[in-house]
Amino acid sequence: MSQMQSVEKHLRGMILGLEIGPGERLTERWIECRFGASRTPVRAALLRLETEGLVCRDGRGWTVSPINLTELEQIAVYREAVEVAAVKLTCALEERSAVDVIEA
């Protein structure tokens, strides 16, 4: 695993695990020290996380993106629709083993 991939993986985990909260500022120097990486892979990792919407540029630094409640609500609606459709399909196909799993 390259330095960039390692930094990206660890930062993503810290952001998604809320070890680094929404709105918190990130400095390249802090990331360099924290992960023992040089500036180029740190910047590359931040750019990749930016494309995922996890961080955003804040002037000269970086900030963890805020949580978008509207987007979370939409995801919950889509997830429920998919789960209901999966249950209906399973029941329609009368796969007893799958129904047993659902009931468990």
Image: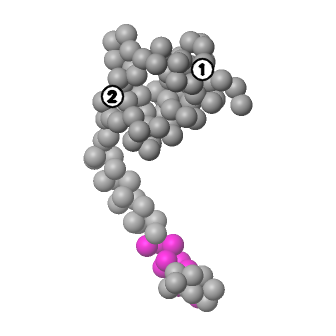
Per the rendered image, the range of residues in magenta is 84-94
* Label 2 vs 1, first from the N-terminus: 2
Q: Is residue 46 left or right of residue 2?
A: left
Res 35 quadrant in image:
top right
Q: Is residue 75 above or below residue 68?
A: below
Residue at (32, 40) in percent of width and height: 67
Question: Can the viewer see residue 81?
Answer: yes
Q: Residue 93 at x, y = what percent?
A: 59, 84
Residue that label 1 marks: 36
Residue identifier under label 2: 24
Pick whichever, 53 or 74, lies toward us. Answer: 53
Q: Quadrant of residue 9?
A: top right
User: Was residue 93 drawn as part of the magenta stretch in this picture?
Assistant: yes
* Image mark count: 2
Q: Name the mark on residue 65.
A: none
Give neighbour class at mark 2: few <14, some 14-19, many 20+ (Cα, 10 Å): some
Q: Amino acid at mark 1?
A: Gly
Q: What's the amino acid at mark 2?
A: Glu
State the residue at coordinates (52%, 84%): 104
User: Residue 7: x, y in percent?
Assistant: 58, 28
- Secondary structure of the residue carrying numbered label 2: loop
Whether tag 2 and tag 1 are in contact, CB under 8 A, the answer is: no
Counting other residues with Cα less than 10 Å from the Cα at mark 1, is it few (<14), some (14-19), or many (20 or more)?
few
Q: Image check: 3 left or right of 66?
A: right
